[in-house]
Image (cartoon, coloured by chain):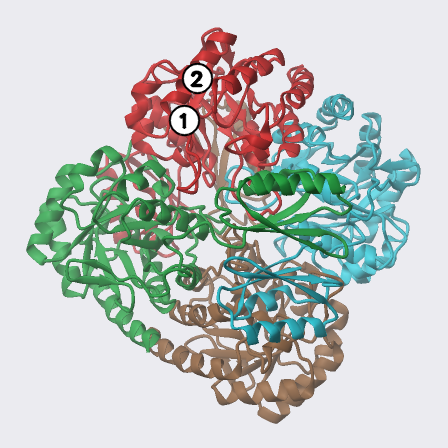
Chain colours: A brown, B cyan, C green, D red
Amino acid sequence: MIVVLKHNVPQAKKEQLITWLEHLGLRIHVSDGDYQTVLGLIGDTTQVDMDLVASLEIVDSVKRVTEPFKCCNRKFHPDDMVVEVGDVKIGGGHFALIAGPCSVESEEQIVTVAKAVKASGATLLRGGAFKPRTSPYDFAGLKAEGLELLKIARAETGLPIVTELMNIMDIPLFEDVDVIQVGARNMQNFDLLRELGKLDKPILLKRGLANTLKELLMSAEYIMANGNERVILCERGIRTFSDYTRNTLDLSAVPMLHELTHLPVIVDPSHATGIARIVPPMALAGAASGADGLIIEVHNDPMHALCDGAQSLRPEEFDALAKKIFAVREIVKA
Amino acid sequence: MIVVLKHNVPQAKKEQLITWLEHLGLRIHVSDGDYQTVLGLIGDTTQVDMDLVASLEIVDSVKRVTEPFKCCNRKFHPDDMVVEVGDVKIGGGHFALIAGPCSVESEEQIVTVAKAVKASGATLLRGGAFKPRTSPYDFAGLKAEGLELLKIARAETGLPIVTELMNIMDIPLFEDVDVIQVGARNMQNFDLLRELGKLDKPILLKRGLANTLKELLMSAEYIMANGNERVILCERGIRTFSDYTRNTLDLSAVPMLHELTHLPVIVDPSHATGIARIVPPMALAGAASGADGLIIEVHNDPMHALCDGAQSLRPEEFDALAKKIFAVREIVKA
Amino acid sequence: MIVVLKHNVPQAKKEQLITWLEHLGLRIHVSDGDYQTVLGLIGDTTQVDMDLVASLEIVDSVKRVTEPFKCCNRKFHPDDMVVEVGDVKIGGGHFALIAGPCSVESEEQIVTVAKAVKASGATLLRGGAFKPRTSPYDFAGLKAEGLELLKIARAETGLPIVTELMNIMDIPLFEDVDVIQVGARNMQNFDLLRELGKLDKPILLKRGLANTLKELLMSAEYIMANGNERVILCERGIRTFSDYTRNTLDLSAVPMLHELTHLPVIVDPSHATGIARIVPPMALAGAASGADGLIIEVHNDPMHALCDGAQSLRPEEFDALAKKIFAVREIVKA
Amino acid sequence: MIVVLKHNVPQAKKEQLITWLEHLGLRIHVSDGDYQTVLGLIGDTTQVDMDLVASLEIVDSVKRVTEPFKCCNRKFHPDDMVVEVGDVKIGGGHFALIAGPCSVESEEQIVTVAKAVKASGATLLRGGAFKPRTSPYDFAGLKAEGLELLKIARAETGLPIVTELMNIMDIPLFEDVDVIQVGARNMQNFDLLRELGKLDKPILLKRGLANTLKELLMSAEYIMANGNERVILCERGIRTFSDYTRNTLDLSAVPMLHELTHLPVIVDPSHATGIARIVPPMALAGAASGADGLIIEVHNDPMHALCDGAQSLRPEEFDALAKKIFAVREIVKA
């Protein structure tokens, strides 16, 4: 950590700060510039409250040199992590195509969609049983029953299942789920993350609407620091002023995250745009950006979907898209 | 709800849509313009998936005429709600000054601060026992012990206590707390909101970092629709591109919310700015904007605070500020 | 335009508003709902001040049915516009690869880069002679001399040249330039746009950092309404809270703009990210999103570039990238 | 400037970078941490391309220690600047109340409004003659004729006039204007700023919709570095995701700018909100935040205003507001 002092700080105040920092177990390296003094803090600075130091009267600004995340930091883990879900691999050159409906609605619906997406090349099945809804008056999912229907679809197709958990108390219900998804609104539900860190199961962690990449990594850190290293990151659009689309898909997050962490990074073009006819170009763009996978909403009857029908592709649209996704992926990998 | 159709839509497709909407129990009012047809949907449209209708090929755009919130809608509740916490009233002309440390750290600390802020005119005591922290390595609060210390400070001063709840499972611990706070990161933790709706206790609901006013009201609606009408809204800064301050305090939210809802609206200048020396002007601005209260961090020893020391005022700074707040409040009320 | 009135508006006030609107030359279609009255305004509503109507005491909200842009509206121009620059075509299936240095620095530099990018498949040469710089102390371009050097590079390679104009008074200097670029900071320099509308020359119009798609189209409208229909739109990143990259490239703008307008849409991954090593994935993502072209910074010696060296590719990096861009483009077009 | 190197950088590469930096005339102070090496660059670093250094393979990150602005930097100008406009003073304890219509429409209108706002305590008269409009089809102001009408109103009331300039070529028309306003969309029209720096006249510089405080200061620097030190900064709302108001008024900019610069800072609550009934609370909040002045739209007949009628106060509303503004100002100053 680097602490830049203001111009003309009295020597006594400077020494007082240095003594205080040394009491935190740090060594201090003093460097006097033409105009200002700079302190280099050497040692374990994770316990130093950066904002507090910055607020001191004699301090001009503070900068962290080492990131506050460790478990998910590529600096300490240069090789890509490959997350295994049964036979399916994600990351390190392995591309995951995850597809399925926003909500599980019935056995017929989920099995039909599962078979269709598998035939198109999907490697995992997604489907919501517990649904976060902005309005208390909207359909909130089939809950436990939905999980059972997902397992039936898995049995019929062999596709591992990915589904969202909203609440610590529901964890026991998810024992037989293959990948647990943490939704954007729960990205900083720290109690939930801590509990998921105690499971032996891959976690799909979605970036919050207004969260920076550093915050996303700190949330991954919560899971990993508690013992569960199998975290998959997901960019799904951020909130901006931009009109016409629901969110702004931030694809530059993909290569940036690949620099910062060894965890796999996937893209959700369905929630990012909220408009089915924009999903295919954004899915292709996601593949072209180097993502390790895509998660796409597919529904056999979007007009009658109980949730987010507006952003769901029909199976035949998904099939045409999947072919192009694999083709783009080949070019990117080359 | 109003549905604007595209130019030159075939009559058959138009009738098909009208029939489908009528099956949802709505009456449809057709209005043909020079260029486009507009459908007026009359009846209960809360069940209509606006995004789905907007995504139909023949539809140009969709607009809701009535807001999707009811319990907290001023249209149906023209008089200000006054939330009572013991003898203290908030809203409808009653101003609440809530103060205290970010985290409860010890009996001495919380009692000292409580006495000081009471002497300066604070009407409620705040203090965190369960702390949401971005990093898994940071101090996360004294938890149950912290709640006990708050109760001691209440006993000593008579100030009702406000403290944050992060997790449904902790609700039993909060039975004797006066006001439960829902933090910004939990504003859309819908399961939590639903449970709080079953309590008989005021809820202080903070606006999320990237949430619109409509979403804030929908979250209040979750609590109220489950039976608990005593909700206090809190603006605490939103996330923008702006540099230098941690967040951007959106004070225009105060008069806008007063138009949209009858619930009281308070302002948190401490979290919005993250910088103690900016708190006083923003607190005064909050009072001047017409807020029904302020919630301000005060610590007797910010340099050694375990959390957010950078944004805490010293008791003597708070005292000077409180005098000005009350003076501004008098002008605004006049 | 649709005007939604508040609940329980007195009949007299309602009639007063209708009379006022009729005086603006509109026909008014009244539709009474269960709860609120809706007015449909039929006729030319471009002169109606939507914000003023919305601010009236009896009005709940207002919605435009027809967009305020006409010249660039796909509704009235269903076929893609193909912009021709000499033999080069952009839009309607024709893909433009525009490359070159941020700033023109010397004859040797610009000719070297021009030859290199042409060999890699670029179809136009870019290079800045007049440079907008945030700081008054930074290099602001070679100005008129830079334009001459660009013409030399054009003579040597046959590539048409694209370069930025910042100021109406400089228009005469740009007579022999092939495409005039309007930078992001000038997107709403309305006087400049109006003058460019009087030229017979393609205009490359960049989206402003904080501008919506509708505002971008209104700026194109300024140029087109003055007589110049050859406008190329360019997405180059918007300003958000996101860390690590300079801006957030909003690729969903590409398919959305293709719906709204018949004008060609290109993508600038260099300015959007500001980091050379992120440019290739974002360029590929741009091509995959369906853009009609890309504009990419290439410099033979980025370490010694006078401007934006951090985001420039070396010629050999550009060559490898161009091959992949063309391959992705083939898949998307198929 | 501080340059943090990556872990395990080869000694040869490190020395190569140091040599390169020394060639730029800097002295380099090397500090080896446990994990990383930090270079302190001592000397004039304004010429160093921070982004380029950050992009080097061996560099982890870069931080500027001294801000790139000088003329407007409070570090070098500890005393508040007082801008004088005739007898009127702004800054350093002097509060300016600037009021008038969005557009000048007729002699009767501007004189009527000028007399009214003067009677309420306004110290300067605002009025637009050249109007930036998003749509090419909207009223763009009376131009030169509008300036003449403003001068008539000044003659009648003695109020100095403030009006917007959009274009370098119009500067001669503004010779007899008291304060030239640079609108938000022109904040980074660098050629315009440079020319305004050559005038002997106060400049009211509005913050752009998506500009940081640092960029605002750099734009002030453009004017000041060219010789004109009389710059007044104006916060007028930034673009965010927030619904209901047109922009988000960022009042924390006021105390932050007061720390960073000695220039006066005023607030425009009218453009920030776009809604007349929200203007009074935001004006009071602006005064409470410590602003050196307010600029408020007042129109004698908002329903028939040719521009922005929705955000204009009536003279009697302004009169009531002005009394409260002065009262709040007294409290803040105390």
Q: Position of residue B158 (x, y in %)?
A: 91, 35
Q: Residue furthest bottom?
A: A156
| The quarter of the displayed image where residue C278 is located | bottom left
**Residue drawn at x 24%, y 36% as measured from the top left:** C139
Question: Mark 1 touching mark 2, by CB under 8 A?
Answer: yes
Q: Is residue C173 left or right of residue B197?
A: left
Q: Position of residue B149 (x, y in %)?
A: 85, 44
Q: Position of residue C270 (x, y in %)?
A: 32, 54
Q: Which mark is residue D149?
A: 2
Q: Quadrant of the C terminus of chain A?
A: bottom left
Q: Is residue A152 left or right of residue A34?
A: right
Q: Position of residue D233 (x, y in %)?
A: 47, 25
- Name the foreground residue: B81 vs D23: B81
For mark 2, give the secondary structure: helix
Q: Which residue is mark 1?
A: D142
* Gap between marks 1 and 2 measured at Cα: 9 Å
Instruction: Report the amino acid beneath label 2.
Output: Leu
